[in-house]
Image (cartoon, rainbow, N blue to C red):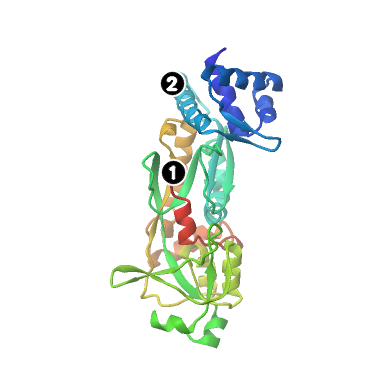
Amino acid sequence: MDRFQAMQVFTRVVDANSFTRAAESLGLPRTTVTTTIQTLEAALQVRLLNRTTRRLSLTPDGASYYERCIRILADVEEAETSFRNVARGPKGRLRVDVPSSIGRLILIPQLCEFYERYPDIELMIGMGDRTVDMVQEAVDCVIRIGELQDSTMVARRIGTFHPVTCAAPGYLERHGTPQSIEDLKDHKAVNYFSSRTGRNIDWDFIIDDVATEVKLEDAVSVNDADAYIACALQGFGLIQAARYMVLPHLQTGELVEIMPQLSSSPMAISVVYLHNRHLSPKVRAFVDWIAELFGNCPLLSGGTEENLETECKFAGKAGNNTIRAVLDREDIAERLY
């Protein structure tokens, strides 16, 4: 058995999550792919994949072996790349996962520029607020909000998440504008609940330099980013969302910032990848590109109110209707390892 080819076949099966699709992408008969995996498992004396009629999944041994295969194949790719003139740059399939708001507002509107630079990279973009198992789901890199808690991951900080508290003018006309934390007890909120626990996410304010969680009574709770912003626009209550997500509505007056003297804890936005994939040219290309992209977005790169006009011009590339999302703190925690 050709061990190197077996590694290639195995990783392709995992990436494609299908024997048939892996065979098609490799230009091999499906029976050859199946036999290769069976022979590999026999040689290693472990089961690598759990197979059902509907899906494939890695066993614990399979996940460990997959990580090592990825590292070996990446090393080979890097070695070959360094000894030949690759005029067209990095190539291959790259799977990334990003929060839906960042995908819609920041990433998708700039994809043409990415492909102008890297025409041979095939991007697979997953968007959502759920936890992603990078090994089981064969994801090359992700964008996370919050501090990285697992030393096996490599994180590069690319921006900052700045929350803002706001409400629709109609709501404030009916219920008044809160001026302090104490005033919030007389107000309703649109709360965001965790899909994992079903519990509402507490709000966050910095009081006397200390991050303080506050519970608000809700008029409605949702677990969808678009619904969260839409409920606020309809006047159901107060919301706390990232400034860059609600910026167009603040500019048009559809939403009004309240209690600006009370800020919320900013959080780091990072691009994260497995420690053994740092040599991959395609991962490196994407990480450098997304870092540059965020660096050109003032309110994501540590900008302040003075950057609002510039930020609006940047956000305008995506269109105001796309900037409707929020990430709750508990789901942020779920996205960390």
Image position of 178 with respect to 199: above or below: below
Q: Amino acid at mark 2?
A: Ala
Q: Estimate the x, y position of residue 86 in percent, counting from the top left.
A: 49, 24
In this rendering, the label closer to the viewer, 1 or 2: 1
For the point 54% across and 81% down, which residue is it?
A: 169
Q: Is residue 113 above or below residue 219?
A: above
Front residue of this view, candidates 137 and 296: 137
The kind of secondary structure element at disc 1 is strand
- Which numbered disc flags the more N-terminal residue, 1 or 2? 2
Question: Viewed as shown, does residue 289 lie left or right of 59?
Answer: left
Q: How many marks?
A: 2
How crowded pointer 1 is (Cα within 10 Å; few <14, some 14-19, many 20+) is rated as many
Q: Which amino acid, by three-letter code, is at mark 1? A: Val
CB under 8 Å between callouts 1 and 2? no
In the image, is residue 319 above or below residue 261?
above
Q: Which residue is mark 1?
A: 272
Q: Is residue 146 visible to the viewer in this orientation of the structure?
A: yes
Of the numbered discs in the image, which one, if any, rests on residue 79?
A: 2
**Visible residue check, residue 178:** no
In x, y percent, where is residue 312?
50, 63
Q: Quadrant of the N terminus?
A: top right
